[in-house]
Structure formats: C-alpha cells, structure tokens
Image: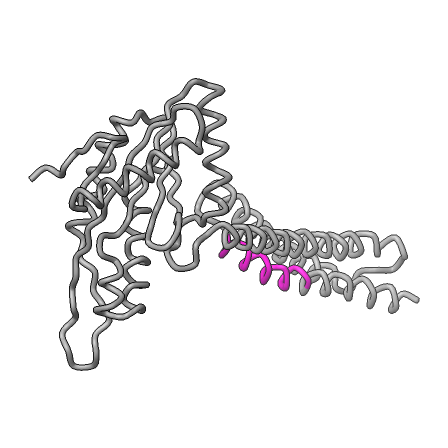
Amino acid sequence: MQNAILFIGNGLVITGILVLAITLVPLCRLLGQLPTGSTRAQWRILAALVLFFITGYTVYATLNWDNGNNVIDLVVPAVFFFGAIFVFMVCSLSLNTAQDIIRIYTLQLESVTDPLMGIFNRRYLERRLKEEGLRSQRYSQPLSILLLDVDYFKGINDTYGHQSGDLVLEKLGQLMLNSVRESDIVARYGGDEILVILPNTIDSEAFLFAERLRRIVERFEIELPNKSGERPLLISITVSIGVAGFNQSTIDLVETVDKALYQAKDEGRNMVILGNEVFAPAT
C-alpha cells in the first residue's frame, strides 16, 4: 500500500512537471501573436511563473521522492497535478481564442477590402458614406469627399498590358493609404476611380488636401515588370480629382463630386475641381 501511494504521488508530480513543460508551447505561440504592449508583458510574466512552477515541482519531487506513507500524502501531488492541468487549459484556450479572433477579423477585413488595391471596397464605402452623412447632420459637423480618376488609364492598359495596369492600381492604392489621414476612408469606387471620405473637413480644406494628393501622385514613379535582361521601366501617372462638401444628402454629395471629376477631365485632366469652380494646378 505504501509503495502504491508513493508511486502515485511521484507520478502525479512528474506528470505535472511534464504538463507545465508542454504548456510552454501554446504559451510561446500566443506570445508570438501578441503585439508589443502591456498585454504581452503580462503573458510573459505568466511564462516566467510557469518556469518557476516547473522548478518548484522539481524541487518538491526531489525532496519528497521517498516520502508518502498515507493517502493524505497524495493531496499535495494531486494539487500540483490539477494545477498544472488548469494552467495548460488556460493557455491552450487563450491561444485558440486569439486565433479565432484573428481569423474572424481577417475574414471581416477581406469582406470589406478590394483585393487588388488593398483599400476598402464599394460595399463598405456605401455604408460608411451613409454613416458619416448621418453623423454630419446630427452633430452639425462638416463632411467632404474626393473622387479621383487615373488620367488616360486605358492607354496604360493598351500600351503596357493589363498586368501593368493592375500594378498601377495596386501602387496607387498603397500610395493613397500612406498619404491620407488616419480618420479618412479610402475606397475603390469603381474601375480606376477612388473615393475618399474626409470627416470633419470643410470643402476648402478638402480642396487643399486633394491638391496635395494630386502633387504626390504626379511625382510618384511606378516600376513596371520588365522582361529578362531589360532595364526596369518607370512610368508616372496623374489623376483628376473632384471635391464636394456635404450639403443636404450623401446622394447629392456623390452626384456633385462626380460632376466635378468629369469637369476636371474635360478641362484638361491633372487638376482639382471644387464643386462648379475650376482650380487648375499651380505651376
């Protein structure tokens, strides 16, 4: 009987040590998925505690390897064993939960993102435009939008091929994301047209912002794919931009900015139009 109790007690402690060691696997994977910050620091503390517990279990097993005469002597080993199981389950469930959250977020992001340009898609744009319009009315805050179009984009496709045209759109999307403010919403309106929602921005400020974007695009060079042995081909593009400020409804806003864009294209392209006024680019 005494040998059986001793065997069970030692087995519980050793198994507890092994479980804690295995716990480090999901714990390290979880740490690898967490961004730098207080939450990650707290999980690192937990990892240090797990290592401390492993050391403590090992010391206990060494000092009490031959001790265990009564059933009551199994209480501590049992607590050690189930404590290790508890820590393992918490870490494993935390890792699974984090992965599920990342998976759900990724799916949601993919559902509202244009796969080519990496900006929001038309469906998300329409929802946000409605929300921002209602917010502008409710709180009497200004709201402006930009609608831009790549000048002579068809010529790029015809001259360099559709793959090069797709690359131009991809690079333009990245450039837009790097150029707008964090509060702005950039979305693909259709084809090579991009619509930008500018919350809490009056139309005159939106025009200055659009002019800055126009200059950024004009100075940006895009490296097109080249055949083996040939030098890379660098091209520049320009955009025409329409600007409109919120008045009565988001429908009127889109119609106004659409007319402004096509006026910019009719007036010679590579310029910004605010409403019905023409603002040619400064030289």
Q: Which x, y percent locates residue 161?
A: 27, 70
Q: Nearer the viewer, residue 152 or 18?
A: 152
State the residue lying farthest toward the right.
1
Indicate whether 3 appears above or below 201: below
- Magenta-colored span: 19-33
Q: Nearer the viewer, residue 100 or 69?
A: 100
Q: What is the count of numbered marks? A: 0
Q: Nearer the viewer, residue 3 or 162?
A: 162
Indicate whether 77 appears above or below 146: below
**Horizontal placement of 74 versus 36: left or right?**
right
Q: The N terminus lies in which quarter of the figure?
A: bottom right
Q: Which x, y percent locates residue 82?
A: 77, 54
State the residue lying farthest toward the bottom.
229
Q: Nearer the viewer, residue 72 or 245?
A: 245
Which residue appears at 22% of the width and 62% of the height? 155
Which residue appears at 28% of the width and 37% of the height? 260
Q: Which x, y percent locates residue 270?
A: 18, 46
Which residue appears at 63% of the width and 59% of the height? 23
Q: Quadrant of residue 26?
A: bottom right
Q: Which x, y percent locates residue 37?
A: 45, 43
